[in-house]
Image (cartoon, rainbow, N blue to C red):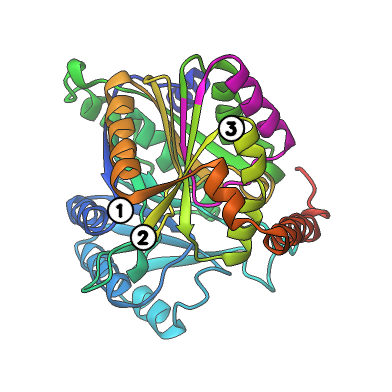
Amino acid sequence: MSRLRKLIHMGYSPRNRVQLVQGGAAYFKKLESLIEKATQCIHLQFYIFLADETGQNVISSLKDAAAKGVAVYLQLDAYASQGLPQKTVNELREAGVQVKWFESLFKSRHFYFGRRMHHKVVVVDGCYALVGGNNICNRYNDMPGEPAWLDMAVYCEGEASYVVYHICRRMWGEKIRTPVVHWKTIDAFCATIPAAEYTDVRVRQNDWVKRKVQVWRSYLEVFNKAENELLIMCSYFLPGILYRRKLAQAVKRGVTVKVVLAGISDIRIAKHAERFLYDWMLKNQIAIYEYQETVLHAKVATCDNSWTTVGSYNVNNISAYASLELNLDIRDRNFALHTRGIIYQIISNHCKEITRENYRSSAHLLRRAWQRICYGFFNTVLKLFTFYFRQE
């Protein structure tokens, strides 16, 4: 455990190999290959897990892993995954998959209804991790005649995966029957990664109640230090007052700030609230692009062709103060350039730029009033669900 503490204290650990995984079929192919390669243990943490075609495929893979003697731990948010039938949960448990709910609505110690586990994490054998914004259901997969929502994840092998593994163990809470994956095993695995592929990775958590605000600080750090470009892709972009001030200051320093947002949203009131901030963004010379193909659900940012973050964290106060979030920060030029290139392809091929002219022509007085109401409602609901939270 001393090595784990050292890794956490270091922040960025060097012995990692990473790959950007786009959503849809590519994500689920990677997920199923990870489950298949497991020999000792699998930890999965998801906000939404449903028993549709996509969910059933993952369930089948988990049952197969358990049948091989792999210890499988599936932790789900009790609110967002309440659509998973109890029959399916019972079948998983009978097959040897351990299932646990995060903050069951009427059994929570503090009844923190607004505190949800927003993680989308898989870690296998303490060596391999998949961290992103994807949930487990059809809308995140490419289905016949229906492309997946736009999402992204990072596949990581190495030391950072070991940190994620221990986060999952700690969140499970109860005694876990499988032994801890020992550092010697991870050290030997990391020795197989060619030095030329080493990538600095930092695991970042956000859980305000537990005094973890690491992802929030990561964004604040790059907003303060950016020199050339900030590129943000976010599904629900509602930055708080401090973030807005820092973004405006970055623009004044000469930083190009571009945000890629949803044109089609699964939560309409959040989209109207987000559009209320368009006037502020345009006044502060922040370029806005709306993705037009499907729902945009990715949570990604790059800075100065040198830094990238990918995970579950949205740039808004729900992620900052209510939800449990997990991101990976990657400090690597090649990875940042690759991610930036993919985002720019999406901008070029699938986005509509929101200019001052087309925004003003569409945002008539009644629409602006409605957007203001939605923005106020969004903030009021957040306060209602979190005002009684206490930091531990």
Q: Is residue 107 visible?
A: yes
- C-alpha span from label 1 to label 3: 25 Å
Task: Name which residue lies at 36% across and 60% down.
Answer: 149
Q: Is residue 125 visible?
A: no
Quadrant in which residue 190 is drawn:
top left
Name the residue that disc number 3 marks: 214
Task: Name which residue lies at 74% across and 64% down.
Answer: 111
Q: Which mark sits nearer the N-terminus, 1 or 2? A: 1
| Residues marked 3 and 2 touching at CB (< 8 Å) | no
Q: Secondary structure at mark 1?
A: loop
Quadrant in which residue 211 is drawn:
top right
Mark 3: which amino acid? Answer: Gln
Name the residue that disc number 2 marks: 149
Mark 2: which amino acid? Answer: Trp
| Residues marked 1 and 2 touching at CB (< 8 Å) | yes
Of residues 350 and 178, the one nearer the viewer is 350
Is residue 380 highlighted in magenta?
Answer: no
Relative vertical location of residue 290 with respect to residue 86 in this rendering, above or below: above
Describe residue 196's horizontal placement relative to residue 55 as left or right: left
Magenta highlight range: 230-256
Name the residue that disc number 1 marks: 23
